[in-house]
Amino acid sequence: MTIKVLDNENERIDKYLSLVTDYSRSLISKMLKEECILVNDNIVKPSYKVVYNDEIKIIKDYFEEIDLEPEDIFLDIVFENENVILVNKPSGMVVHPGNGNKNHTLVNALLYHTKNLSDGSDNLRPGIVHRIDKDTSGLILIAKNNKAHEILADDFKNKRIKRKYIALVKGILDYNNITIDAPIGRDKVDRKKMMVTDINGKNAVTHVKVLKRYKKYSLIECELETGRTHQIRVHLAYIGHPIFNDPVYQKDQTTSFGQFLHSSEITFNEPITKEQLHLKVPLPKYFKDFLEKIEHEE
């Protein structure tokens, strides 16, 4: 959506857009923060005052009012008590409604499973403390009450929760271990992508360990020190070894399964009892079947 400013000059952009669109002022502020609104192709703050002939681009479709419906969708629950749920999410499942996905998400399934979920970071994300991409499979941690959510969010922020991922990348890594320390920010050309950049980039660190080498691929384990959007996918593409079947960060044709990236392990303290929990889940069948196929091609 592109809007040309022809009146209401010197109005704050958040107020201006609330007058000329169906978006609320609070949602507009969020969209500006997420760099989904540009003025003359530049990032601006909510306090920016529009000028005659400004060209405002809204580069993502947002929707605000959604009735979250419980849906009877199978959940692979690895662990659950009165405070948390740990789900093994399949590839292809979106975590929460937003940007064109109004239903069939993990949140819809959770609402059917239980009435006890934290308020989340907004009304579309009950229980959601962190997220993994739609086509990334594996472990995701859910809070069942606000106290648990608050503690877990702080644990994520202060790096007390350890996560490990398994990925299949293109090419042969020459090293057995590597730490990728490169800041990540939004891609300046394609705003739906992320990239390694010093311009408005945020600190991002990924530790990589090679598990096995194949003829054309490497199976690796990644441990996150930070949790930036698309971090593992961006970092691996940056060093020239993009994740196999990634529809965004590598150029080859892909299947509907998406990137071969699996959240395999998590270690955290139960937020209320403080018991340390370590849980691990196997690779999804499609992933394992492909590994067997390339094993036989050796």
Image: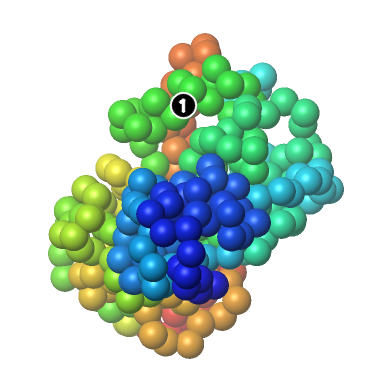
Left or right of 70 in this view: 54 = left
Quadrant location of the C terminus in the rendered image = bottom left
Q: In the rendered picture of this protein, how many numbered marks are placed on residues?
A: 1
Q: Is residue 21 visible?
A: yes
**Image quarter for residue 116?**
top right
**Residue 243 or residue 54, whichever sits in front:** 54
Graded by Cα atoms within 10 Å as few (under 14), some (14 to 19) or many (20 or more), the crowding at tag 1 reads many
Rendered location of residue 253, percent (x, y): 48, 87
Which residue is nearer to you in this view: 292 or 138? 138
Q: Residue at x 39, y 42 (%)?
A: 163
Residue 8 rendering spot, x and y as whole percentages: 47, 58
Q: Residue at x 63, y 27 (%)?
A: 118
Which of 277/74 is in front? Answer: 74
Q: Is residue 74 visible?
A: no
Describe the element under mark 1 as helix, strand or loop: helix
**Where in the figure is residue 251, as x and y percent of width and height?**
39, 85
Q: Which residue is mark 1?
A: 152
Left or right of 186 on screen, residue 269: right
